[in-house]
Amino acid sequence: MRSHEIDYEIIGQAMQMVEVELDHGETVIAEAGAMNYMEDGIDFEAKMGDGSKVDQGFMGKLFSAGKRMITGESVFMTHFTSQEHGKRKVAFAAPFPGSIIPINLAEMGGSITCQKDSFLCAALGTKVDIAFNKRLGSGFFGGEGFILQHLSGDGMAFVHAGGTVIEKQLNGETLRLDTGCLVAFSDGIDYSIEMTKGLKSMFFGGEGLFMATLSGHGKVWIQSLPFSRLADRIIQHAPKLGGSGQGE
């Protein structure tokens, strides 16, 4: 199934949203709860699966939904379809501050791999699947790095990253980074998770027990502020329960 051809505009700087423009009959799929606003004439429906296979039966949809449950995502995806002639717009944003990366899957060889919670929305026809790290070992305990999402198709897909985003082109080089800082990578990149060497580095280095290693030929997208890191800092500095209140 060929993906629908959608137009879009990225709005904002630090806390971005993407506004998708739909022609009559065009559809964009999104994670549940990602929609900000939509114009009149757009219908939306929660469906089991991404709609990439029109002939997929109930059991096939159920199997795909089951795999999404493993990643902690909603079983259902929301499909937004324009029913009016002319242009209609619908906008999406992630639930935490960051940047939105537009990716033309056709230019990426037809697919990319991304963190399980970074997918935001895509043109109908995009297949959203999960990809387990082939090298289990320490990767089994590597948090964000173990279960990834695989997006395939020939249309536009949008992924969200926390903080500032940098895009690196690898031409046979090797790059090592914190597992949570990885947003996505294209085909041609070999990905694995390694345990930090040395007891001191593990317990006193502050960089976590695992590092992601990427090598090969392709693109890698990196985020400066993973949501997991932001959440940890908030929890660390939150007032302790049972403390004295004001006025005491």
Image (cartoon, grey):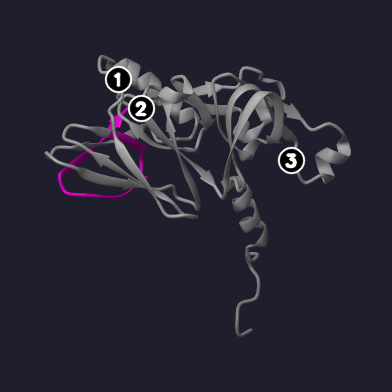
Residue that label 1 marks: 2
Image spot of residue 135 (x, y percent): 66, 18
User: Which one is earlier in the sequence, the residue at label 2 or at label 1?
Assistant: 1
* Image position of 228 (left or right of 63): right
Three-letter amino acid code at the position of disc 2:
Gly
Residue that label 3 marks: 208
Cβ atoms under marks 2 and 1 closer than 8 Å? yes
Quadrant of the drawing holding the N terminus: top left
Image spot of residue 111 (x, y percent): 46, 22
User: Which one is earlier in the sequence, the residue at label 3 or at label 1?
Assistant: 1
- At a point 67% along the width and 31% down the height, the residue shown is 142
- At a point 63% along the width and 34% down the height, the residue shown is 143
* Image position of 231 (left or right of 130): right
- At a point 31% along the width and 28% down the height, the residue shown is 48
Three-letter amino acid code at the position of disc 3:
Gly
* Count of marks placed on residues: 3
Q: In this view, does 47 lie above or below 98?
A: above
Q: Quadrant of residue 216?
A: top right
Quadrant of the drawing holding the C terminus: bottom right
User: Which one is earlier in the sequence, the residue at label 2 or at label 3?
Assistant: 2
Image spot of residue 4 (x, y percent): 27, 28
Residue that label 2 marks: 155
* Image position of 77 (left or right of 167): left
The alpha-carbon separation of the residues under discs 2 and 1 comes to 8 Å
Three-letter amino acid code at the position of disc 1:
Arg
